[in-house]
Amino acid sequence: MIIAICRNGAGLPSLAPQIGVGSPDPDLHQIVRARNTPPLFDWMVETFSFQGISDRVAASYLHAHGGITWHEISQIVRDPACALLDSYWTYESCRYDKTRRTCSHPRYIRRCPVPKAPLRNGHLNQTAFSFFLFVRDVADSDLFGWIDGQLSAAGELGDGSAQEALVGPTRHVFGVSDKVLTMTLSSVLMADREGRPDWYAVGSAMIVVDRLVHNFLVRTGILQQLGMVHPYGPRCYADGGCAEVLRRVSAQIDARQFDGDFPADFPRFVQHALWHYCAADGLNVCNGNNIDDRKSCDLSSCIVYSNCAKTALKLQQ
């Protein structure tokens, strides 16, 4: 089943830059090659804008209104009106709301730089400033050196400890989920395979388990057959969870059959192919838009219909 879905989804494009798995974003490739932190920051902040909304809407808003850059933020935080912006460790409980134009320190809002970001909502404005302060104060304005240091401290490349060495500290950046962090960091790590093979080894093994991927493994009966049934949530990443299933499966699928440039074992691509098959912004097949979760699936046009267990989702969770 998974081989069929991987073959069906290989090479399909997406509007969101962090979703590119098979071929890196050419702009990102040049950024990583140049080892230039400000444009890497800009690229990552843009990808964060794709969370919580459809890729098409996010891309349209960015095209119409633009984003905010490292250089713009660095100019306007030099003498911040609000003490929250003094450092990464003090920037918390900002609560800026773009629609209401309110925050936790309203007496400073007229001179505060956070509202100056033209992002889609106040949540994303806070994310941009929180991430800037992380890069400036934690990474010493050098994301490349910080990534190298984190991976070096993690031990063997490509395992879960390497992924956690990067996602763990950055998950405290305001408003960015583990899912978005993992997708974004994976793309950064895979952007220059030739120049940074150690980065590529880690990025290609990164797995994101969202509800779509978990539900696919339930509906198809894969979790049941492996004796690994569990509810969606933290257990997806624990021993016997969805991430382990995907890594097991990936180890048995030579991804070079889908693209000769792929590594033989490519967990990130396998996970992405399943997500793309299910997602409304992807192929929009195996999801609640087409399947009544209370019943067995009757979507006979699905390419794995004949092999699927068609498990009613709500009977299992």
Image (cartoon, rainbow, N blue to C red):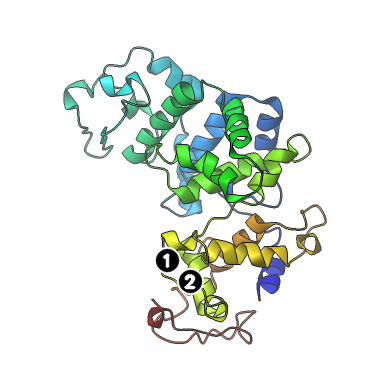
The residue singled out by tag 2 in the image is 215
Q: Secondary structure at mark 1?
A: loop
Which of the two residues, 31 or 111, is positioned nearer the viewer here? 31
The residue type indicated by label 1 comes to Tyr
Q: Indicate left or right for 94 with 183 as reference.
A: left
Residue displayed at 38% across by 79% down = 314
Q: Position of residue 261 (x, y in %)?
A: 80, 52
For residue 187, above or below residue 8:
above
Q: Residue flagged by tag 2: what amino acid is it?
A: Asn
Residue 147 versus residue 293: which sits nearer the camera? 147
Judging by the rendered image, the residue that carries numbered circle 1 is 232
User: How many discs mark residues in the rendered view?
Assistant: 2
Which residue is at 61% across, 36% downward? 151
Determine if residue 273 is in view. Answer: no
Mark 1 closeness class: few <14, some 14–19, many ≥20 residues within 10 Å: some
- Considering only vertical position in the picture, is 191 above or below 79? below
Which sits in the foreground, 140 or 280? 140
Q: Are marks 2 and 1 in contact (CB under 8 Å)?
A: yes
Residue 125 horizontal/vertical position (percent):
37, 34
- Which picture quadrant has residue 84? top left
Q: What is the quadrant of the N terminus in the image? A: bottom right
Residue drawn at x 47%, y 41% is 168
Residue 49 makes an appearance in the image: yes
Mark 2 and mark 1: span between their CA atoms? 8 Å
